[in-house]
Image (tube, rainbow, N blue to C red):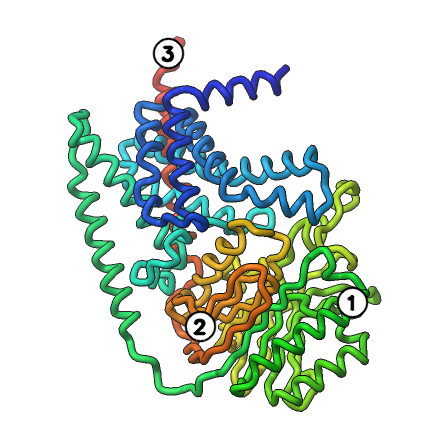
Amino acid sequence: MTLQLALFTTCRELLDRRGLLAIASGLLIAFSFPTPGLSFLSWIALIPLLIAMEESTPRTAMRVGCTCGVTAYAIILYWLNTVLTRFGHLPWSVSIPIYLLMVLWLALFYGLSTSIARLGESIGIKAAFTLPVAWVAFDFLRSFLFSGFTWAMLGHSQFRTLPLIQIADLAGVYGITLLIVLANVVLYRALRAVSGADVPYPVKSAVILLMLLVATLFYGFSRLQRPAGAASKPLRVALIQGNIPQDVKWSPEYRDKTVNIYERLTREAAKGGVDLIVWPESAVPFFFQDEPRQAERIRKLARETGAYLLLGSPAHELRNGRNTFLNSAFMISPGGETTGRADKLHLVPFGEYVPFGNILTFINKIVVGIGDFAPGERAVPLEAAGVKVGIQVCYEVIFPELAREYVRAGARVLVAITNDAWFGHSSAPYQHLSIATFRAIETRTPLIRAANTGITAIVDKNGHISAMTGLFVEDFRTGEIEPGSGKSLYLTIGDAPACFCLLLTMGVALLAWRKLKKNIDEEKPNVP
């Protein structure tokens, strides 16, 4: 009965005026991400939500914020059901609740942001301050809570607007998110003032917004026009996209054909001469360590092309006397020797291991054919043609701290190898690429991306995406990249600005709680 009542209350909220406005905001947010990628919508997306929050209690503000978040993420993450049912082999009756739980979890952070904004207003702090700060704070929280999920933060929607997003090397994607939320608040208050509502014109906040935008764009254009440093010899790269169907990827009968495809594409890509060839995540669907015949074919190919060859392969090693499986990348020298291995550090829950596997025995891993993976122990840059490269495998490219760790360890090129086949023909590969773009700007280190089914691309240190492939085609891309300098403020301070926003948000909540407690104490009758 309690569950039925909760569902009824939720449906009633969705159908009232506040709920409809929150849904409108959620739709605008969703459409600002790829695809369709109408990024300008994010700058006005929160206006209906802010109208819905008018004269609301913090509890009501939280409900409308959650409604907005549910709408946005239900659309952005629709592809999760394809992953869970087709490749996770879960029935829809299990897939949909898991999908909804993920949507509700992410929506909770929207609700907390709007609730804090209303709490702030209750103690005289304007939403132009509290909402942007709280939004960043809760985005930061979700980046690490329960393994973290940094997918589709508002700032990511601007990945194509290069002058704007250059400040990512100062404050990460959080700086862009803060600007977007502040712009929404200022535009909302200006529209309400113009419409005749009893709302003053947001003069001070508009001036602050204008100053921030001018400074941001000035910085962005100056970074884009800055000449390349002296330096380093360009690295000639070839990125191979084998387009191996996920349904047959781990089939022993398909192994030879898989290697044949990569051999043919590699020879074609290397005709003009290259320094580094990159194959995607798990490009070889066997243990490279344990297959001498197949491994020799690949070593021979490296010798033939005269290039370093980086390939994704599962690996294993003994840890504490137990055989441990790893999702790894091996570097093969032009002489055919294995010169290093990098292991994936941040694994995909339910994709590469099942959390609480003793309890959730009915759930299978999405990656079939191998037992649960274990994370790598540390970031290990590998060397290719005199340049250290940091390898990020698939999902872990969405975590900025891992890219920082590799660059701090000496990497001057970031290499993202991935298998996005399980996303199918959906928006997810485009969303994945848009997030990866920020790793290049934050660290001022170029990023090259080899994907099994696409999108394979080259991203320079300013976030400019070039040489993109299409989805689900056999293809390759070649190009020259200038190794990065390993210098940016974000590399030094990390997420300190976002952490500061979290502290400010906690301060607002504490002040509001103290005022509420004081009011309650004052209202208590004096008993002699």
Q: Are marks 1 and 3 in contact (CB under 8 Å)?
A: no
Q: Please identify the residue farthest to the right as the structure is shown.
A: 321
Q: Nearer the viewer, mark 3 or mark 2?
A: 2
Q: Which mark is residue 319?
A: 1
User: Could you say where residue 289 lies in the image, as x and y percent from the top left?
Assistant: 77, 75
- Indicate which disc, 1 or 3, sits on the residue closer to the N terminus: 1
Q: What residue is shown with label 3? A: 526
**Disc with the residue nearer the chain's start (2 vs 1):** 1
Q: Earlier in the sequence, mark 3 or mark 2?
A: 2
Mark pair 3, 2: CA separation: 66 Å
Residue nearest the viewer, comparing 332 with 92? 92
Task: Report how many numbered discs are placed on residues in the image.
Answer: 3
| Tags 2 and 1 touching, CB below 8 Å | no
The residue under label 2 is 445
How far apart, in angstroms, are the residues tagged by discs 1 and 3? 67 Å
Quadrant housing residue 241: bottom right
Give coordinates of residue 106: x percent, y percent. Answer: 51, 40
Name the amino acid, label 3. Asn
Q: The N terminus lies in which quarter of the figure?
A: top right
Q: Is residue 345 above or below residue 507?
A: below
392 or 204, nearer to the observer: 392
Q: Secondary structure at mark 2?
A: loop
Q: Is residue 293 visible?
A: yes
Instruction: Determine which quarter of the picture holds residue 18.
Output: top left
Judge from the rendering whether residue 34 lies leftward or rightward of residue 415; answer left or right.
Answer: left
Q: Which quadrant holds the C terminus?
A: top left
